Amino acid sequence: MPSWHLEDADPIAAANPYTFYKPSRELISRVRPGEVVKLVFCFESDDPEAPRAERMWVLVDELLPDGSFRGRLNNEPRYIRDLKLDDPVSFQPCHVINTEHDDNDNLVERYIKRCFVTKRILDDGQQVGYLYREEPDEENDSGWRITANDESDEYMSESKNLAYVSLGAVLCKDDSFRELLEAPSGSAFIRNARSGEFEADDDG
């Protein structure tokens, strides 16, 4: 038995739509022989430094009538010992995590810029209660600052209680504010405790 198997990426993408990119079935249907696609090869290893999987490209040789593919590994594995360049690989659309086809408006790319957010949201499971946008600190910064709106001044003064992550990472926890993210710098929104809806905060 081989030490590796291909990961079904569908449930991972479904659980993490804003942080785990997977091309749509329509996009995968455009793949033709001679193109490469990326798959996740999970493996077992005695090396404590080894990751749980390697992401590698496969050159597509054949499209089968049932929608599956045959191809050859187009990378040299770093950790997997019983797999090498040009070895045959059979796979399904559920295994494909990238193609050569452009898909620049996917959710991961759309919300890849970073924001400051409190651990009340990321770790404690609280809903977003207040957010405001300031001028970005650098190119990858969205300018958004996001809190649950129940954090004390003491809590906010501790850097360990804040994280600098992609907007997508926050949206995976709570995406109820997604439609607000196109608002310009200087915007602020607060969740109405009664209605649960966001309202502009003119004093923000």
Image (cartoon, grey):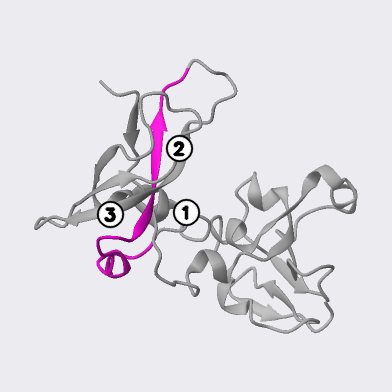
**Which of labels 1 and 3 is toward the front?**
3
Question: Which element type, helix, strand or loop, lies under badge 2?
Answer: loop
Q: Quadrant of residue 164?
A: bottom right
Amino acid at circle 1: Asn
Q: Position of residue 174 (x, y in %)?
A: 56, 60
Mark 1–mark 3 contact, CB under 8 Å?
Answer: no
Relative to 201, is 107 above or below? Answer: above
Q: Quadrant of residue 115?
A: bottom right
Furthest residue in direction top, as rendered: 46
**Residue identifier under label 3:** 60
Can residue 116 be seen here? The reply is yes
**Residue identifier under label 1:** 16
Relative to 41, is 16 above or below? Answer: below
Which residue is at 82% across, 75% downward? 134
**Which of labels 1 and 2 is toward the front?**
2
Q: Position of residue 146 (x, y in %)?
A: 72, 63
Instruction: Say which label, 1 or 2, has the lower sequence index.
Output: 1
Can residue 176 be seen here? The reply is no
Q: CA distance from mark 1 to mark 2?
A: 29 Å
Instruction: Say which label, 2 or 3, has the lower sequence index.
Output: 3
Which residue is at 72% across, 67% downward? 130
Q: CA distance from mark 2 to mark 3?
A: 16 Å
Residue nearer the viewer, 89 or 194: 89
Amino acid at circle 3: Val
